[in-house]
């Protein structure tokens, strides 16, 4: 076998995500289950011995069967713990369905999931077992649209908005700028909350600090928090809790049964930032 063929086989046998030009994460590919370019991105699903099914968009890990709960639980539950009466929920992005599943654990009136890529929905239904049951819940409403266009065009308002975007590249780039957050704020009910994933506190701290700067011009309360996600760059991830009336510390309701990551101690600890982050964000 030639060197080129060996390289090709290696590439095929391994899925690599580079976090810097000289480091990253790789998965030995037990099976390539899906690889296609949609109108928006390259969607891949591989099977790995340890992590199970792994979803990649444009080569970037989005979620894995084994560790998806780390991200979905810490993104969703802090907001639900403190909102006085969370009834109308919006999820922008989130095509793998994990955030939808977590939001539906609460007695909400309705959850609108706005996903730009219909192919993502089909892939998630096929390979990630938690999506279909969530979409079949009568309270879930799936909208196939660009999240920024949706939020601009809707007259609906929401109690909690989750921004479960992919990385700030490609179709997701519009979900990370000041203009987008200003529009989101206009769609919030009184005591409304926005929670967004904002990247790696190790690799993306500068962009998190920049985002914090404009968010403080839009929201009175801007609270960053962190949580571990084993397969994300650096192994920890940063989120931001935004509101004008509600702080993320006055817990009002019980934690749902059956969670694997989130509890009230984890929730409180998440907002305790390590010095290298805290000193940059104050
Ligand atoms: N980090 C998440 C996790 O661990 O589950 C995954 C993020 S989720 C896969 C990101 C979703 O946002 C994708 O389904 C992608 O198609 C969608 N998306 C990207 N840009 C979008 C946009 N402008 N409007 C709505 N959805 C968008």
Image (cartoon, rainbow, N blue to C red):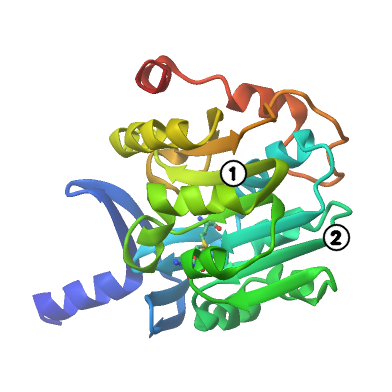
Quadrant where the N terminus sits is bottom left
* Residue hosting label 2: 109
Q: Earlier in the sequence, mark 2 or mark 1?
A: 2
The secondary structure type at the circle numbered 1 is strand
Q: Is residue 104 left or right of residue 160?
A: right
Q: Position of residue 147 (x, y in %)?
A: 51, 66
Would you place residue 30 above or below residue 88 in this image?
below
User: What residue is rendered at 87% in x and 34% in y?
Assistant: 253
The residue singled out by tag 1 in the image is 195
What is the x, y in percent for residue 279? 37, 15
**Labels 2 & 1 near each other (Cβ < 8 A):** no
| Front-most of residues 246 and 14 | 246
User: Can you see residue 260?
Assistant: yes
User: Is any atom of residue 54 visible in this view?
Assistant: no
Quote the CA–CA distance across marks 2 and 1.
19 Å
Query: Can you tell me whether the CB of the residue at mark 2 lies under 8 Å from the nearest atom of ligand 1?
Result: no
Residue 208 placement: quadrant:
top left
Total marks shown come to: 2
Query: How far across and down, in percent of the image, does residue 79 sit?
Result: 70, 39
Residue 162: horizontal and vertical position, in percent? 61, 52
Q: In which image quadrant can residue 6 be found?
A: bottom left
Q: Residue at x 48, y 48 (%)?
A: 182
10 Å neighbourhood of mark 1: few (<14), some, or many (≥20)? Answer: many
The quadrant of the image that shows the C terminus is: top left
Q: Provide the secondary structure element on which disc 2 rests.
A: loop
Q: Residue furthest left?
A: 3
Q: What residue is shown at x 58% (from left), y 36% (from top)?
A: 241
């Amino acid at each position: 076998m030639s060197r080129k063929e060996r390289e090709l086989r290696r590439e095929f046998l391994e899925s690599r995500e580079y976090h810097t030009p000289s480091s990253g994460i790789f998965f030995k590919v037990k099976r390539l289950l899906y690889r296609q370019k949609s109108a928006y991105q390259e969607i891949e699903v591989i099977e790995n011995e340890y992590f199970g099914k792994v979803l990649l968009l444009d080569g970037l890990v989005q979620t894995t069967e084994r560790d998806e709960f780390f991200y979905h639980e810490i993104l969703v539950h802090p907001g639900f713990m403190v909102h006085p009466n969370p009834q109308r929920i919006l999820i922008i992005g989130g095509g793998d369905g994990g955030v939808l599943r977590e939001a539906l654990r609460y007695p909400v009136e309705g959850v609108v999931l706005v996903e730009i890529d219909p192919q993502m929905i089909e892939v998630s239904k096929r390979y990630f077992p938690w999506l279909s049951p969530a979409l079949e819940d009568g309270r879930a409403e799936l909208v196939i649209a660009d999240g920024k266009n949706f939020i601009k065009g809707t007259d609906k308002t929401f109690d909690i908005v989750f921004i479960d975007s992919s990385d700030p590249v490609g179709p997701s780039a519009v979900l990370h700028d000041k203009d987008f957050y200003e529009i989101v704020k206009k769609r919030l009910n009184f005591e409304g909350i926005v929670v967004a994933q904002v990247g790696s506190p190790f690799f993306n701290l500068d962009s998190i600090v920049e985002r914090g700067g404009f968010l403080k011009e839009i929201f009175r309360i801007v609270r960053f928090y962190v949580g571990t996600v084993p397969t994300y760059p650096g192994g920890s991830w940063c989120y931001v809790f935004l509101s004008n009336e509600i702080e993320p510390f006055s817990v009002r309701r019980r934690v749902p049964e059956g969670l694997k990551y989130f509890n009230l101690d984890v929730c409180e600890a998440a907002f305790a930032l390590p010095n290298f982050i805290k000193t940059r964000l104050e």
